[in-house]
Image (cartoon, rainbow, N blue to C red):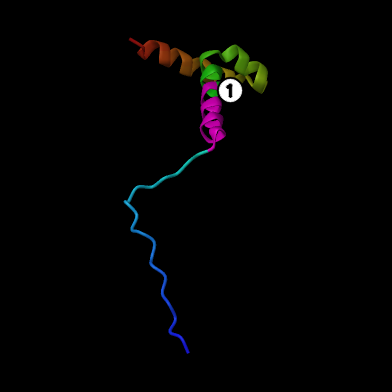
Amino acid sequence: MSAPTHTRPHPATTGRVDIRLPWWALALPTLAFITLLVMILNPVDAHAATGDPAITHLFERVQQAVQHNAP
C-alpha cells in the first residue's frame, strides 16, 4: 500500500486584489449621471420628460442655486 502524496499549496498571494470590471459597469452610471445633470441644468427638457410642473419648478430652483453659488 502506498502512502498518499500531498500536493504543494498555491504560493501565497501578494495581498493585491485584482478585480476587472466590464466596460459597461462604469459607462452606465456615468451616462446616468450625465443625463441627470443635463436635466437639472436644462429644466425645459425635464418638464417635457416629466409633465409635472412641480418637478420643473424644483429643477429651476436647483439651477438657480447652482448658478448663484458658482464662482
Q: Which residue does the image show at 35% across and 59% down from the upper left?
A: 11
Query: In the image shown, does 37 or 60 lie closer to the viewer?
Result: 37
State whether residue 70 is above or below residue 3. above
**Which quarter of the rendered picture does the C terminus lie within?**
top left
- Residue 24 is one of the magenta-drawn residues: yes
Taking the spot 52% from the left edge, 22% from the top edge, the residue there is 34
Q: Magenta segment, principal secondary structure?
A: helix
Secondary element type, mark 1 = helix
x then y, percent, for residue 64: 45, 12
| Neighbour tally class for label 1: few under 14, some 14-19, many 20 plus, Cα within 10 Å | some
| Quarter occupied by residue 18 | top left
Q: Give the range drawn in magenta.
A: 22-34
Residue holding disc 1: 55
Outermost residue to the front: 1
* Res 22 quadrant in image: top right
Q: Which of 63 and 7 is in front in this view?
A: 7
Q: What residue type is labelled 1?
A: Ile
Which of the pair 44/13 is nearer the observer?
13
Does 58 appear in magenta? no
Q: At 58% across and 18% down in the image, what residue appears?
A: 56
